[in-house]
């Protein structure tokens, strides 16, 4: 049967099991939206800005592990997607971003709403395609999904010319994708695995350092087995939180700039670092010359270009974390590291995450503790800034895909639309959005689809009336010159929520924090926004200043 | 770390946009391309690129890995560490008044080069060879006045059959 390119696209998405497309309509994508009109299987979620659409697709992908799909028109629609594509790229999130493009005969002519999308997105996506004819659609979509979801996952851009959307051709979906130049290596080399196991068995002060790659490869079970079988203490990065339960005695919690003192000291004193799906990011390592100076390093990663990029590696293992860990688990046994564990436990006891109560102010950490107490099973979607670090520190994550945030690109405005995607992907879970006053207002318009769909999102704003993280740096490193961070002129977010049609609650006193959170639990016919007015100048500690070594962590402002 | 010159032989899918992806890989990381040659192979679906670049060992390793990571790249070989043959062609337009033409043609002969165009006051000379030979020929012709010069960039392939 002959179908239009737009209909072939939708049929192809059906073949890939796509339930939702997050999009915003526009001229050059109209045939696609027309094909989606009242479609029984593939539902279009009408977001209010293309950036929101891309983050929603991203949040859906992070929560479910499936490929997120976003759709926008040409030109400004496509350029608005770019932040979301780059966000997904930095965190290796499987996504297919479809953009309408002007008619092929107009391309390159500065046509209305024309933009070289392939050119603009090239450095921020895993791969991209330009469809100029309807008969290419099925093959391109099959390849795009294959590339987005295999190897090191990432976003794939499909730019789709309008005449190709209209042009009719025969629909035949390829049964198998075979790209001769793309064969990700998933099995780790047995000799390398044996070498790693030998190092593990001979180490005196080993630590496991796991990242987002563990979650991406669904290797959380295998990671738990490795840690528990060997008895090696473990730190999990911001991107991997929940891959190993933070409540477990072996957990040292998060490492890095605002990580636990224990994890940072453990890196510095260790004699073996076993990195799994983590990339030695600058926010984790601090000054590279002082990073784990006495440790041998094992690095398991599916992306060969990640290995040895920042830190020299003694035993590189290219492969899928799940497969490699499963092989390792067959060979490892318990290691005798009692003195090291004593030291680790001493650090944990001596330097827990802690804060001081300031007068009658609501401390932001207190709010997170209360959220954790009432919503410990929820999916938590964090934004970017101080609240993100407090959430990472004070909420104890126990399951993979429980904590979603923009770790790599650090995109403010990510969380509200991502929470929408997460809630649609996991309708039976409670989704908590921990947001900041600065980040919330960047994508606040996405309250509209959340309200329309009656999504029971719990939107908790840690409102300190500042771009708090920048203000903290200004306080510490710029002589308190608070340039362009004062957000006291923000609107009343509770009133604004009501104006949108959601429930809005403003909390200004400590004793109102818990009752408000309890009340939010009972609201399930739409989003609830709680605006917590917190201590304005509280800082995030511990802190490893940019450029310092992990051993030079500032524990607090005492 | 010391900088080294490396020659990468890269087989890529012959599709639009591939060159931009490769160029973007270098420019986005601040790596430099010394020369780049692209043309179809015997198989019209596949293009061969010869990329000459330089950097310390870590940069060269990153270039190798990132080239491999590109979806459209079929195969990457660092020819610097392999036994290989390399060639380049240069076209040199040199001033050649009738009284000096004889000297220039002698140089052409010594280098087994070719004269490919003759004008009233100039000659275009084609020299093929490795880098050293091209440099020697250009240096010898420079005193006569080089008006224009164009090089193909290096092309290179491995000797023998890869096992």
Image (cartoon, coloured by chain):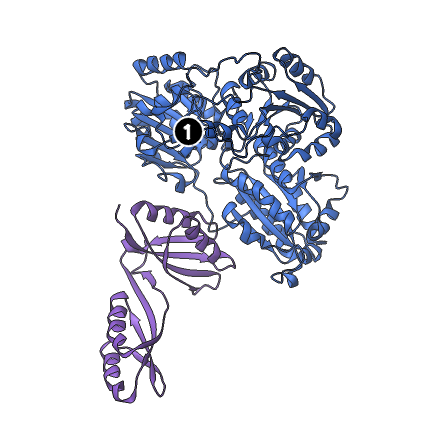
Q: Position of residue B83 (x, y in %)?
A: 26, 58
Q: Position of residue A148 (x, y in %)?
A: 54, 42
Kindly identify the residue that appears in the image at 37 percent across and 38 percent down: A307
Quick one: SS at disc 1?
helix
Q: Position of residue A429 (x, y in %)?
A: 64, 23
Mark 1 packing: few (<14 Cα in 10 Å), some, or many (20+)?
many
Q: State left or right for residue A27 relative to residue A311.
A: right
Toward which corner of the image does residue A526 lie, by quadrant? top right
Chain coloured purple in the rendered structure: B
Is A478 situated above or below B67?
above
Residue A441 seen in this snapshot: yes
User: In this orientation, which residue lies closer to the viewer: A127 or A457?
Assistant: A457
Residue A173 seen in this snapshot: no
Q: Look at mark 1 in the image and give the residue it sits on.
A: A325
Is A436 situated above or below B154?
above
Q: Chain of mark 1?
A: A
Kindly identify the residue that appears in the image at 59 percent across and 36 percent down: A58
Toward which corner of the image does residue A296 lie, by quadrant? top left
The number of numbered badges drawn on the structure is 1
Toward which corner of the image does residue A274 lie, by quadrant? top left
User: In this orientation, which residue lies closer to the viewer: A222 or B52?
Assistant: B52
Chain coloured blue in the rendered structure: A
User: In this orientation, which residue lies closer to the viewer: A183 or A209?
Assistant: A209
Q: Position of residue B149 (x, y in %)?
A: 35, 73
Q: State left or right for residue B13 relative to residue B2.
A: right
Kindly identify the residue that appears in the image at 44 percent across and 47 percent down: B69
Is A405 situated above or below A356?
below
């Amino acid at each position: 049967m002959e179908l239009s390119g737009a209909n072939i696209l939708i049929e192809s998405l059906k073949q890939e099991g796509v339930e939702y497309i997050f999009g915003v309509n526009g001229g050059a994508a109209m045939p696609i939206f027309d094909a989606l009109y009242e479609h029984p299987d593939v539902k279009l979620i009408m977001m209010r800005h293309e950036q929101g659409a891309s983050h929603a697709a991203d949040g859906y992908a992070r929560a479910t592990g499936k490929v997120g799909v976003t759709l926008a028109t040409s030109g400004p629609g496509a350029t608005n997607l770019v932040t979301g594509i780059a966000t997904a790229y930095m965190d290796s999130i499987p996504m297919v971003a479809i953009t309408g493009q002007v008619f092929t005969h107009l391309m390159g002519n500065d046509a209305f709403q024309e933009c070289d999308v392939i050119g603009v997105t090239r450095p921020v996506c895993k791969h991209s395609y330009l469809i100029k004819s309807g008969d290419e659609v099925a093959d391109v979509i099959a390849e795009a999904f294959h590339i987005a979801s295999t190897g090191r996952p990432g976003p794939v851009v499909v730019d789709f010319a309008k005449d190709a959307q209209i042009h009719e051709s025969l629909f035949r979906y390829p049964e198998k994708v075979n790209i001769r130049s793309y064969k990700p290596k998933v099995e780790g080399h047995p000799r390398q695995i044996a070498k790693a196991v030998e190092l593990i068995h001979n180490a005196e002060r080993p630590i496991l350092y796991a990242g987002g790659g563990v979650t991406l490869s669904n290797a959380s079970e295998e990671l738990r087995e490795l840690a528990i079988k060997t008895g090696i203490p473990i730190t999990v990065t911001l991107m991997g939180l929940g891959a190993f339960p933070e409540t477990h005695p072996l957990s040292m919690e998060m490492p890095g700039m605002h990580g636990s003192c224990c994890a940072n000291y453990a890196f510095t004193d260790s004699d073996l670092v076993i990195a799994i799906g983590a990339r030695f990011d600058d926010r984790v390592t601090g000054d590279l010359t002082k990073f784990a100076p006495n440790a041998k390093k094992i690095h398991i990663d599916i992306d060969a270009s990640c290995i040895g990029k920042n830190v020299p590696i003694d035993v590189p293992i290219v492969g899928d974390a799940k497969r490699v860990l499963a092989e390792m688990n067959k060979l490892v046994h318990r290691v005798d590291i009692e003195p090291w564990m004593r030291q680790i436990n001493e650090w944990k006891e001596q330097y827990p995450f802690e804060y001081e109560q300031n007068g009658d102010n609501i401390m932001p950490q207190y709010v997170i503790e209360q959220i954790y107490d009432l919503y410990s099973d929820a999916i938590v979607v964090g934004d970017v800034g101080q609240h993100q670090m407090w959430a990472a520190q004070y909420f104890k994550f126990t399951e993979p895909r429980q904590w979603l945030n923009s770790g790599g690109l650090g995109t403010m405005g990510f969380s509200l639309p991502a929470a929408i995607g997460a809630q649609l992907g996991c309708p039976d879970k409670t989704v908590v959005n921990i947001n900041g006053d600065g980040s919330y207002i960047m994508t606040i318009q996405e309250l509209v689809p959340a309200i329309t769909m009656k999504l029971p999102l719990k939107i908790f704003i840690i409102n300190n009336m500042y771009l708090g993280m920048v203000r903290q740096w200004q306080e510490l490193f710029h002589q308190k010159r608070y340039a362009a961070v004062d957000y006291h002129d923000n609107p009343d977010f509770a009133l604004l929520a009501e104006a949108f049609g959601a429930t809005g609650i403003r909390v200004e006193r400590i004793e109102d924090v818990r009752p408000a959170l309890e009340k939010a639990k009972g609201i399930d016919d739409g989003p609830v926004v709680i605006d917590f007015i917190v201590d304005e100048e509280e800082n995030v500690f511990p802190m490893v200043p940019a450029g310092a070594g992990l051993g030079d962590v500032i524990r607090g402002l005492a | 770390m010391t900088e080294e010159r490396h020659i990468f032989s890269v087989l890529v899918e012959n599709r639009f946009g591939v060159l931009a992806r490769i160029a973007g890989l270098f420019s986005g990381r601040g790596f430099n391309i010394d020369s780049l040659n692209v043309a179809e192979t015997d198989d019209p679906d596949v293009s061969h690129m010869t990329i000459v670049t330089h950097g310390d060992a870590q940069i060269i390793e990153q270039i190798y890995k990132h080239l491999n990571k590109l979806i459209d790249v079929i195969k990457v070989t660092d020819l610097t560490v392999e036994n290989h043959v390399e060639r380049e062609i240069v076209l040199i337009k040199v001033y050649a008044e009738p009284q000096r033409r004889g000297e220039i043609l002698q140089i052409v002969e010594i280098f087994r080069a070719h004269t490919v165009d003759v004008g009233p006051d100039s000659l275009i000379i084609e020299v093929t060879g490795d880098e050293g030979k091209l440099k020697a020929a250009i240096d010898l012709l420079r005193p006569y006045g080089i008006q224009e010069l164009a090089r193909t960039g290096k092309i290179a392939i491995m000797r023998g059959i890869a096992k």
